[in-house]
Image (tube, grey):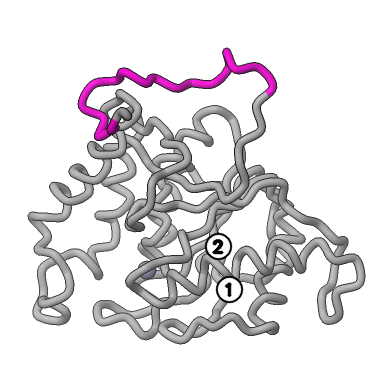
Amino acid sequence: VAATRSIPRVDVLAIAAHRDDVEQTCGGTLLALARRGATTGILDLTAGEAGTRGSAAEREREAEKAAKVLRVGWRGNAGLPDGALALRHDYKLRVASFIRQARPKIVILPYPEARHPDHAVAGRLGYAAAFVAGLKNAAGLEGDEFRPRSILYASLYANVRPTFVVDISAEFEERTRALLVYSSQYRDQAAGREIFPEAGDIRARVEALARTFGMMIGVRYGEPFVSRTPLRVGDLRELDVDTFTRGGLITPF
Ligand SMILES: [Zn+2]
């Protein structure tokens, strides 16, 4: 578990249940942000000790390598129990202490409807932690109160219409490379053969999803997000909405 003391401030913090989750759902967005000069961070909630493949130690090494590929400034681990995440107050406080130190303007969370229960809980836990972090007199929480401005949900695997899609055409190859760094998970092996895709199929799957969301906004590759709060608009002309983009899975009235 990373010492919570040494956490630098970041502009954008992605929180997810497992090492390799962020690589799948919002890694391209993090890399695009870093290229634009933003500071980014990743907080993995668990160490992956309950995973079917690989050890927690292997995944730690892989997570550090992947963070470099995505040019993430800081990556930490909250040490919460893998396979047993729960919406518990002590877990909220643990995550809130990271948020108070990293002080991100934007927090990216997993969309809370998910196949894996840890992913579903991580979305709700992250939201609750961001709220608690802003309570001045929250018992059991050190440091100055802080609340992120925006909570965005990475919705790649959710059956939900994205609020917006980030163009990751220029980042797709590196994002795929960051995922394949996790050879403990994605190299062909006997363990978990019935639940993991074959190594040779991973790139095709990742590409199909990125292409699908990219097509919605008229670019090659995209990553989808949901905001539960409507986007505030001052000047309509600043909205980047391309209604007649081709092949975008858009159904007109
Ligand atoms: Zn996961």
Residue extending furthest right? 137
- Residue 13 in view of the camera: yes
Q: What residue do we see at 23% from left, 37% from top?
A: 211
Q: Secondary structure at mark 2?
A: strand
Q: Amino acid at mark 1?
A: Ala
Q: Is residue 62 magenta?
A: no
What's the magenta region? Answer: 234-251
Disc 2 under 8 Å from ligand 1? The reply is no
Task: Please tell me whether residue 232 is drawn above or below residue 95 in the rendered image.
Answer: above
Residue extending furthest front? 253
Kindly indicate the quadrant of the structure image that contains residue 170. top left
State the CA–CA distance, disc 2 to disc 1: 7 Å
- Viewport quadrant of the N terminus: bottom right
Disc 1 under 8 Å from ligand 1? The reply is no
Kindly indicate the quadrant of the structure image that contains residue 4. bottom right
Rendered-image quarter of ligand 1? bottom left
Residue extending furthest top? 237
- Tell me whether the residue at label 2 lies in contact with that at label 1, contact meaning CB atoms closer than 8 angstroms: yes
* 26 with respect to 227 (left or right): left
Q: Whole-percent x and y of residue 233?
A: 65, 26
* 5 with respect to 165 (left or right): right
Q: Residues within 10 Å of mark 2 (few under 14, many from 20)?
A: many
Precedes in sequence: disc 2 or disc 1: 2
The disc at residue 78 is 1
Q: Is residue 238 magenta?
A: yes
The disc at residue 167 is none
Task: Please tell me whether residue 208 is drawn above or below residue 217 in the rendered image.
Answer: below
Residue denoted by label 2: 43
Front residue of 65/34: it is 34
- Viewport quadrant of the C terminus: top left
Front residue of 208/202: it is 208
- Residue 24 in view of the camera: no
